[in-house]
């Protein structure tokens, strides 16, 4: 049996300490971590999806050791791991504040629209023909808005423009990813797809 001590992950430790101190309830987003260093989020997304040696690849699980290594290389005398996590927390707060300010606010009396079946909720976001959107359960496709009415939206996958999908407002409101997170989620999905492809290629090679 090996007596080699398991090295402590300093990033995980700093996050756990922040949670214990009541600063956050969960890990800061990868988007905010990238923002601390002023870099494109896709770089850290790709790192987070790196397969761990000796473990079965799971695209839903971040490689925290790889993220820690990535972050550690960029720390300075003025920013240790705790300061980095604190900075990422502040970035998340900034993004949340921006989303609240930009979000479409609808008075209670104007949350519904009349249609033949009664009342239907209005859409959470303003959509127009040609706008690109993402759906929560379909990670493979970017959709384009084809047609918009007060109660329904017709969309189609960007790569399959004749495969139309009609969604009522109440379905779209729960299925669509906020437009304010479009770039972040799209980059994360691209990185995840690339990591899965690399893991599959490695398995085939073996």
Image (tube, grey):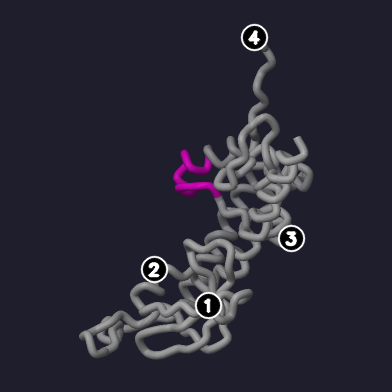
Mark 2 or 4, nearer chain start: 4
Q: Position of residue 51 (x, y in %)?
A: 68, 40
Mark 1 or 3, nearer chain start: 3
Q: Position of residue 119 (x, y in %)?
A: 24, 84
- Quadrant (top left, top right, bottom left, bottom right) of the N terminus: top right
Q: Is residue 188 above or below residue 113?
A: above
The Cα atoms of the two marked residues, 2 and 3, are separated by 31 Å
According to the image, label 4 marks what residue?
1
Q: Main secondary structure of the magenta part?
A: loop
Mark 1 or 2, nearer chain start: 1
Quadrant of the rendered image containing residue 158? bottom right
The total number of labels drawn is 4
Does the magenta portion include 22?
A: yes
In this rendering, which labeled residue sits more in front, label 2 or label 3?
Answer: 2
Q: Please state if 163 lies on the left or on the right of 158 as rendered.
A: left
Residue reaching furthest top?
1
Quadrant of the rendered image containing residue 175? bottom left
According to the image, label 2 marks what residue?
174
- Mark number for residue 39? 3
The Cα atoms of the two marked residues, 1 and 3, are separated by 36 Å
Q: Which residues are magenta?
A: 17-27
User: Mark 3: which secondary structure?
Assistant: loop
């Amino acid at each position: 049996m090996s007596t080699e001590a398991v090295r402590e992950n300093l990033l995980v430790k700093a996050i756990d300490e922040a949670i214990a101190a009541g600063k956050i309830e969960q890990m800061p987003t990868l988007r905010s971590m990238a923002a601390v260093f002023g870099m494109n989020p896709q770089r850290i997304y790709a790192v987070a999806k790196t397969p761990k040696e000796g473990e079965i690849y799971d695209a839903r699980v971040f490689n925290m050791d790889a993220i820690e290594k990535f972050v550690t290389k960029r720390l300075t005398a003025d920013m240790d791991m705790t300061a980095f996590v604190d900075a990422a927390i502040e970035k998340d707060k900034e993004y949340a504040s921006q989303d609240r300010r930009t979000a479409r606010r609808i008075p209670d009396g104007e949350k519904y629209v009349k249609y033949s079946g009664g009342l239907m909720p209005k859409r959470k976001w303003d959509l127009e023909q040609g706008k690109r959107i993402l759906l929560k359960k379909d990670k493979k496709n970017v959709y384009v808005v084809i047609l918009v009415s007060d109660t329904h939206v017709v969309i189609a996958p960007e790569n399959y423009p004749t495969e139309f999908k009609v969604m009522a407002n109440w379905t779209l409101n729960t299925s669509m990813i906020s437009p304010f997170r479009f770039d972040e989620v799209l980059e994360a999905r691209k990185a995840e797809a690339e990591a899965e492809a690399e893991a599959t290629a490695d398995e085939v090679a073996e």
